[in-house]
Image (spheres, rainbow, N blue to C red):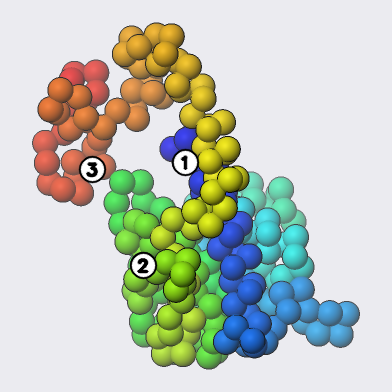
Amino acid sequence: TPMLKPMSEIAGRLSLLDAIELLKKSNGGKGKLIAGTSLAEPANVLIIGGGIVGINAMQMSLGLGASTTLLDVNNDTLSRIKEAYPAVNIAESSKSVIEGILPMVDIVVGAVLTPGGKPPTVISKEMLKLMEPKTILSDVSVDQGGCFETSRPTTHDNPTYLVDDIIHYCVKNIPSAVPFTATNSLNEATRPFILKFANSGLNGMFDDNNLLMALNTFKGKLTNQEVAQAHNLDFVEPKEA
């Protein structure tokens, strides 16, 4: 997870920037400017999930002047975010709260993560009817199966599709659009781990609980509990293996 943090940062930021492009009338959107003007209201952005992806999407949204709301199921997370970013609107995520907000939004960023498994569905196909035509759904969770019922993977070459006149942006591997930044970020994130293995070998992992948690398989045994549960396979504690 620490090594994937920079990828999540990039995905969160690009998900919002790419959605802004889709707001333009020339790109099939509503024809709104994200920040509005002195005489016109800014666009409304809803971010579901307060992890690395969600926070980075929120930072971009706030920085560009959008009216921004972030939802999460963890009240402690929401309190910390509100303290650090007073301009953001926060609320505990639930089906009724999401349904109440959808008629007003222009962009929805789905940033829901379930480690090792498919994220929950937070917007159903039925809920698409609540949104204005050409509202943008950006599902950053699509790599893990998606958090919108109508999500299906797309590519940078053909990033969007319509369902009930709602624009879906569901690109897998969003950071691949900026490979220079992504590669340098990943190199910096992995460097400490590479050095530890180079200098200490397997013993360096066995003496470090954080590294040991990252072990997936060892000598034919599955040592990742989430993967074992997802595929109904036997799980062995890393230290036992």
Q: Residue at x 56, y 63 (%)?
A: 15
Within 10 Å of the Cα at label 2, are there few (<14), some (14-19), or many (20+) other Cα atoms?
A: some
Residue 94 appearing in the image: no
Figure check: 189 above or below 55? above
Q: Quadrant of residue 236?
A: top left
Q: How far apart are the two marked residues, 2 and 3, measured between alpha carbons?
A: 21 Å
Residue 46 image-quadrant placement = bottom right
Residue matched to label 3: 227
Q: Secondary structure at mark 1?
A: loop
Residue 31: horizontal and vertical position, in percent? 67, 87
Badges 2 and 3: C-beta atoms under 8 Å apart? Answer: no
Q: Is residue 134 visible?
A: yes
User: Residue 234's spot in the image, x, y percent?
Assistant: 11, 36
Residue 228: x and y in percent read: 18, 41
Residue 81: x and y in percent read 64, 51
| Rendered image: mark on residue 4 | 1
Three-letter code, disc 2: Pro
Query: In the rendered structure, are the residues bearing label 1 and label 2 in contact, judged by CB atoms less than 8 Å apart?
Result: no
Position above or below: 11 against 212: below
Task: Say whether marks 1 and 3 touch (CB < 8 Å).
Answer: no
Position of residue 189 in the picture relative to residue 164 (left or right)? right
Q: Which residue is mark 2?
A: 153
